[in-house]
Amino acid sequence: MITIVYERLGTIVFWLVFLVVCYITLALLVHIPSLLRPTIIPYPWPLMKEKEDIKVALAGSYNPPHRGHLAMLLYLSKRYRHVLAILGVNPRKQYPVSPETRAALLRKMLQEADVTNVNVQVVQGYIWRSAKRQGVRLFFRGIRSWSQDGREERHLQVLNTWGPLLYGPLVWPIPTRYLEGKPEYNHVSSTLVRDITGRKDDAPETALQQLVPDCVVQDITRLYGSIKES
């Protein structure tokens, strides 16, 4: 009797392992082409006659948010009915400007632009886990060009493919598409914004007007200027 039980357990374990291996293999076969040949959307970004009724996400640190971020979110809001702007948080890291404050800046920018279908969220832990739970179908990442940013983005894409499979566990990965930046904003970065706010010999608000919307110029000057002074 015991022998029969062990045999049946062994058979069950075998088939479970077999199914898991098949599932992971299938997921990798589906996603490997996108790792080798990523989907890059060049500017000008295409629009559909009607919005696609799916949920998509543009994740980033938004530290701080700027006109380049806003341009991409405006485009996604016109192409898709539901858009998430996700700020990832490492709970073990201290932030001079909190993720909640950065989220408030981004919400203010979107409100000023009269965008109503972008939901700004602060997420701790794996972004893919929260996105999957909310039914996100596509991740978007903003890049200057693949030749400039591709190496770093490919590494992140590998993590976003293996992470759900290994730590989900066995969660189907969310595919990633890449938006090439609007040319007039390709020089704009959060680092540049932070550097300008720290200048002592210039009027940072005047320089910032080219990088961030007017509605948040004073807020960003106050928040990020104080970091340099402390």
Image (cartoon, rainbow, N blue to C red):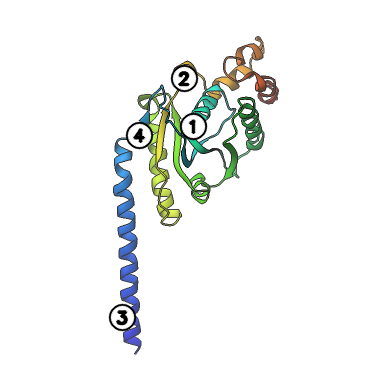
Residue identified by numbered label 1: 76
Q: Quadrant of the N terminus?
A: bottom left
Q: Position of residue 172 (x, y in %)?
A: 40, 51
Between the C-alphas of marks 3 and 2, the distance is 63 Å
Between the C-alphas of marks 2 and 4, the distance is 19 Å
Q: Nearer the viewer, residue 54 or 119?
A: 54
Residue at the spot 66% in from the left edge and 21% down from the top edge = 215
Q: Nearer the viewer, mark 1 or mark 3?
A: 1
Between the C-alphas of marks 2 and 1, the distance is 18 Å
**CB atoms of marks 3 and 2 within 8 Å:** no
Q: Nearer the viewer, residue 197 or 120?
A: 120
Q: Nearer the viewer, mark 2 or mark 1?
A: 1
Q: Quadrant of the C terminus?
A: top right
Amino acid carrying mark 3 in the image: Glu
Residue identified by numbered label 3: 7
Q: Position of residue 90 (x, y in %)?
A: 57, 42
Residue ranking furthest to the bottom: 1
The crowding category of the residue bearing disc 2, from other C-alpha atoms within 10 Å (few below 14, some 14 to 19, many at least 20), is: some
Residue identified by numbered label 2: 186
In the rendered structure, which disc, 2 or 4, sits on the residue that comes first in sequence? Answer: 4
Residue identified by numbered label 4: 39
Amino acid carrying mark 2 in the image: Asn
Q: Nearer the viewer, mark 3 or mark 4?
A: 4
Q: Quadrant of residue 206?
A: top right
Between the C-alphas of marks 3 and 4, the distance is 48 Å
In the rendered structure, which disc, 2 or 1, sits on the residue that comes first in sequence? Answer: 1
